[in-house]
Image (cartoon, rainbow, N blue to C red):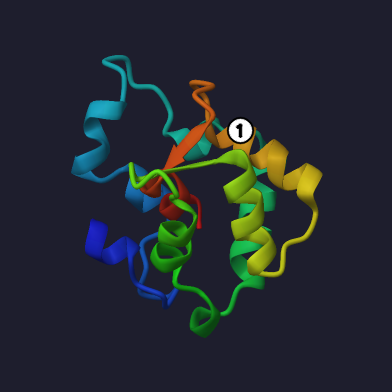
Amino acid sequence: LAQGMLRTNPVLRPTAEQCLESAWMLPLKSTKESPSLWKALDPVSRLVLKLIAHRLEADQVDVYDEFQKRDVSGRGVIHQDAFVTLLSTQGFHDHKLAEAVFTRMDPTGSGELNYTDVACAW
């Protein structure tokens, strides 16, 4: 799963849905058949994430490298300001919308996203 998510070519990279349905993500599912995190997002958040992904060309993006640059703590997480900056470097400059997307991607309210969160959305 991790190797697939690191692919820069979006044709070869698994979709967010595929990532969330992976056996590696099964512990995240509740015992009741809850929808995946992707399905749980409201339509506007899903649309924004899709628009961001489509605006990025495969040769422009190395999500892992960009994430690593912004993981200043070295703990494998980025905070909201780093997420907004990450999107800005990729041509998405609507900071208010980026902050709203971050909030939706952080359902626990921890104020942090790990690489898997970002890669699945990318």
Residue placed farthest to the top in the image? Answer: 32
Whole-percent x, y for residue 96 in the image: 80, 43
The residue drawn where x is 31% and y is 18% is 30
Question: What's under tag 1, amino acid-wise?
Answer: Arg
Compared across the picture, whether 93 is left or right of 15 comes to right
Residue corresponding to mark 1: 104
Whole-percent x, y for residue 98 in the image: 70, 47
Under circle 1, the secondary element is helix
Compared across the picture, whether 93 is left or right of 82 comes to right
Whole-percent x, y for residue 37 in the image: 46, 34
The residue drawn where x is 31% and y is 43% is 21
Q: Where is 83 relative to 111, above or below?
A: below
Q: Where is 19 relative to 11, above or below?
A: above
Q: For residue 80, which quarter of the picture? A: top right
**Closer to the camera, 122 or 30?**
122
Whole-percent x, y for residue 117 in the image: 43, 44
Q: Label 1: few (<14), some or many (≥20) within 10 Å? A: some
Q: Quadrant of the N terminus?
A: bottom left
Q: For residue 105, which quarter of the picture? A: top right
Compared across the picture, whether 98 is left or right of 112 comes to right
The residue drawn where x is 42% and y is 34% is 36
The residue drawn where x is 69% and y is 51% is 48
